[in-house]
Amino acid sequence: MAIYLKYKYISIIFDVGSKKGKVYFVIMAKIFDLGTSMQFIETRGNDGKKPFTVPFSEAILRPIASFGGLYVPQSLPQLSGEFFRAHLNSDYKTLAMALLEACAIDIPKEVLQEALSLYDNFDDATNPVPVVKVKPNLYVSELYHGPTRAFKDMALQPFGVILSHIAQSKNENYLILAATSGDTGPAALDTFRNRANVQVACLYPDGGTSDVQRLQMVTEEAKNLKVIGIKGVFDDAQNALKFLLDSPAFNAALKEHHISLSAANSVNFGRIIFQIIYHVYSYLALVRANAIAMGEPIELDVPSGNFGNALGGYYAMRMGLPVQKILIASNQNNILTELINEGRYDLRTKEVVMTTSPAMDILKSSNVERILFDLFGAQRTKELMQNLEKEHFYELTQEELKVLRTIFAADYCTNEEGNAYMKEAFEAGYLMDPHTATCFKSHATQANPKSVTIAYSTAEWTKFAPNIAYALTGQKGLSDKEALQLIAQKAGISIPSMIAQLFDKEVCQSNVIEKSEIEATILKFLDVTSSASR
């Protein structure tokens, strides 16, 4: 267990949990009270081989827990009304630091400050997450104003700094695995580019991303980054990632290169902790705008694929954010709609459907497991997840479903409905992408009309221009570049430079392989880069 001794100008962490009984001291410059650092436990219980609890730094370095489960906080800090009032006018970085300190994670303050400083590189350093009114009682929190134009930047920009710091402090080298449906990949590659002690292997489904998303990945030149297209869908990439994370043979092969293994997907709580912050920030933005009174409950409307964004909202609610319901918006891969409305997670007859919102073309939503654990405990979670892995199916009891539905509501949006919502919003003066459009359907059918709702816009229009151009004009078959130019002209706006420049960059990561070749391809990359560094 790690004990914080918080006194005067220093805090000392005594970590007495190592097998050899060594005591480590970490000095951090900060005035604190007496308290303990946040500890993490396992969603499927403990196997007797791993520690019963681990600190944040360990949970993010090795994100797969006993029995293939995930790490979750043993407890969450409770944010009082005083906390919300104190930070009503705080900028994003100040609020983020206060939330991270409330969680008492075992990362030095100066490292957190460096990590959070990357929000200064967003479109508006003073307001990296604008909240825009689009309808009566419906506001959109725009999470895409970072370097790769998607919400994954909100978590992965600071995460890259933190993980690289930990690796350097331990004098260890890490391979970061990332599986992407289109947004995690570019964001992970951007944050880890040329960072010390870190190499990245990014898996994406060939043909399963937009062309802009693909270009963001395959034009990456940094020597520590490897981009691998696979013949399959996102679930295949994510299954490969989870298999490799827990594979003794793969981990043994990495040890020969003196490399340890971690992940950048939202199975890693290093992602989730930063996804709590913008829910709190967006709520306070509504209070500042006089859209709600302090303490008034709202609804969150979240486009959901792997469920990390919704999980961040759920944890914010558990910490004290006044949320009366979380609306889960899906596309035609409506597995989450069935779970929340009917209590069944049934993959037995399903295949991924390719839609106009490809980042949500997912059937295995990893972070649902953390919700199951929080509501029903480790034993039941292990039973449900093992059923899913073996039988491709599980079913909640009626009592469990009732509990789930007190928190969540859900609906799904077809391509045609999404197109109609995009056109309607554009004609009313708001340009949005197909993922955000799914929120408009769930808001229309599931929201309490008397409540204010925040919908989360997870990607900029530039990432999915051909689909948006078709929705707005009916023109089919446009290339990404043609569609970008058409929308920019129609909306009277400019194409952001980081997107416009992609079409002139050289493709230098052209690997597309069979799923069976993933492990060998990654090991070959490590052998080449390790040799190059000697």
Image: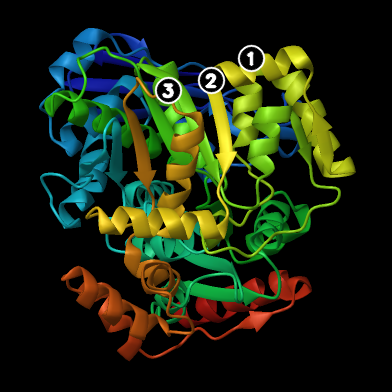
Question: How far from the left and from the top, in percent, is residue 124?
Answer: 13, 52
Nearer to us in this view, 421 or 129: 421
Marks 3 and 1, how far apart in space? 19 Å
Quarter-wise, where is residue 420 in the image?
A: bottom left
Residue type at the position of mark 1? Val
How are the residues colored?
rainbow
Q: Is residue 362 above or below residue 474?
A: above
Q: Residue at x 68, y 61 (%)?
A: 353
Instruction: Report the residue at 26% width, 27% height from top.
Output: 283
Marks 3 and 1 close (CB-CB < 8 Å): no
Amino acid carrying label 2: it is Ile
Q: CA–CA distance between discs 2 and 3?
A: 13 Å
Q: Where 466 sits versus 289, above or below?
A: below
Mark 3 or mark 1: whose residue is earlier in sequence:
1
Residue neighbourhood size for the residue with mark 2, other residues' Cα within 10 Å, grouped as few (<14), some (14–19), many (≥20): some
The residue that label 2 is drawn on is 407
Q: Residue 233: x and y, percent?
A: 67, 65
Label 2 and label 1: CA atoms lie apart by 7 Å
Which of the two marks, 3 or 1, is nearer to us in this view? 3
- Amino acid type of disc 3? Asn
Say which residue label 3 marks: 448
- Which residue corresponds to the image point at 45% horizontal and 36% vertical from the top-left? 444
Residue toward you, 358 or 499: 358
